[in-house]
């Protein structure tokens, strides 16, 4: 499949005006790097843990219709969280964080947009960056370390690894399933990301059509910041609840 897409990209580049290197313009392929996904577990990285669970969604409307948002909203409009999250644990982000030429996110108030910092020429607007991180994962060495340290600590290897990563291999968060993996929790997209580090994970009211899923939302009391966890600190996990409402552009 990867080779198929690579060939398609190369063929498409050749069809662009001026693509022939002899003309001195257009686009040409200067470097090619093939990557690999987990060969047996779809959606898992090579150490065996599910990834891509904690992802923000983009604010904005498709039309003037009341519920025609760019991102589907699953929280009832009467709940204060509805202005901040698309679904429990999934924050809404202003589009300027991803695409040039649009309002950006304010660090201290996610409801009000921050105007773009830089003046951009027309050709840059609606563009974005593509960041590629090249990693080499030594799977055998990782699990050998896990087995040795888990034995020293008197913890089962899978739980020791989950404490390091912050989630079990299934994707269930360690804060909601501290002792063992919970595959049902991991598969529940309304619950598997509904937790905070420094505040209670409060009850959230879902839209009426999701009433049957309401009881599945976990609630945790007190501070549950993990002692051992791997974090990619891009967007802080915190509670920002306010009664204000905005009209999204």
Image (spheres, rainbow, N blue to C red):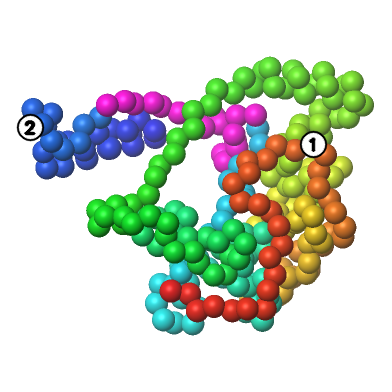
Q: Can residue 216 be seen from the camera position used here?
A: no
Q: Which residue is mark 2?
A: 23
CA gap between label 2 and label 1 equals 56 Å
- The picture places residue 200, in percent across and down from the top left corner, at 82, 61
* Quarter of the image where the N terminus is located: top left
Q: Could you tell me which residue is drawn at 87 percent across and 58 percent down? A: 222
Asked whether the residues under the numbered discs 2 and 1 touch, taking CB atoms below 8 Å apart as contact, a structural biologist would say no
Q: Which residue is mark 1?
A: 228
Q: Is residue 32 magenta?
A: yes
- Span shown in magenta: 30-47
Q: Could you tell me which residue is drawn at 77 percent across and 23 percent down? A: 146
* Quarter of the image where the C terminus is located: bottom left
- The picture places residue 53, in percent across and down from the top left corner, at 62, 49
Label annotation for residue 160: none
- Give the total number of marks visible in the rendering: 2
- The picture places residue 179, in percent across and down from the top left corner, at 87, 42
Q: Could you tell me which residue is drawn at 79 percent across and 55 percent down? A: 198
Q: Is residue 202 magenta?
A: no
Instruction: Report crowding for label 2: few under 14, some 14 to 19, many 20 or more residues within 10 A (C-alpha).
Output: few
Of callouts 2 and 1, the N-terminal one: 2
Instruction: Report crowding for label 1: few under 14, some 14 to 19, many 20 or more residues within 10 A (C-alpha).
Output: few
Give SS at disc 2.
Answer: helix
In this picture, residue 102 sits left or right of residue 232:
left
């Amino acid at each position: 499949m990867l080779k198929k897409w690579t060939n398609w990209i190369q063929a498409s580049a050749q069809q662009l005006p001026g693509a022939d290197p002899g003309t001195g313009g257009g686009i040409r392929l200067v470097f090619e790097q093939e990557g690999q996904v987990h060969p047996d577990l779809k959606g898992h990285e090579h150490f065996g843990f599910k990834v891509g669970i904690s992802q923000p969604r983009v604010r904005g409307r498709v039309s003037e219709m009341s519920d025609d948002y760019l991102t589907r909203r699953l929280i009832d409009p009467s709940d204060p969280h509805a202005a901040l999250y698309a679904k429990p644990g999934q924050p809404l982000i202003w589009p300027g964080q991803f695409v040039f030429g649009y309002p950006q996110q304010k660090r201290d108030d996610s409801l009000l947009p921050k105007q773009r910092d830089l003046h951009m020429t027309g050709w840059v607007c609606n563009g974005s960056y593509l960041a590629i991180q090249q990693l080499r994962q030594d799977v055998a060495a990782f699990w050998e370390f896990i087995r040795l340290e888990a034995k020293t600590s008197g913890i089962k290897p899978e739980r020791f690894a989950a404490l390091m990563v912050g989630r079990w291999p299934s994707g269930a968060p360690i804060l909601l399933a501290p002792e063992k993996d919970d595959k049902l929790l991991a598969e529940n997209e309304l619950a598997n990301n509904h937790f905070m580090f420094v505040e209670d994970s409060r009850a959230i009211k879902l839209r009426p059509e999701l009433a049957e899923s309401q009881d599945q939302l976990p609630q945790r009391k007190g501070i549950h910041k993990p002692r051992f966890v791997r974090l990619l600190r891009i967007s802080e996990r915190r509670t920002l609840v306010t009664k204000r409402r905005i009209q999204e552009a």
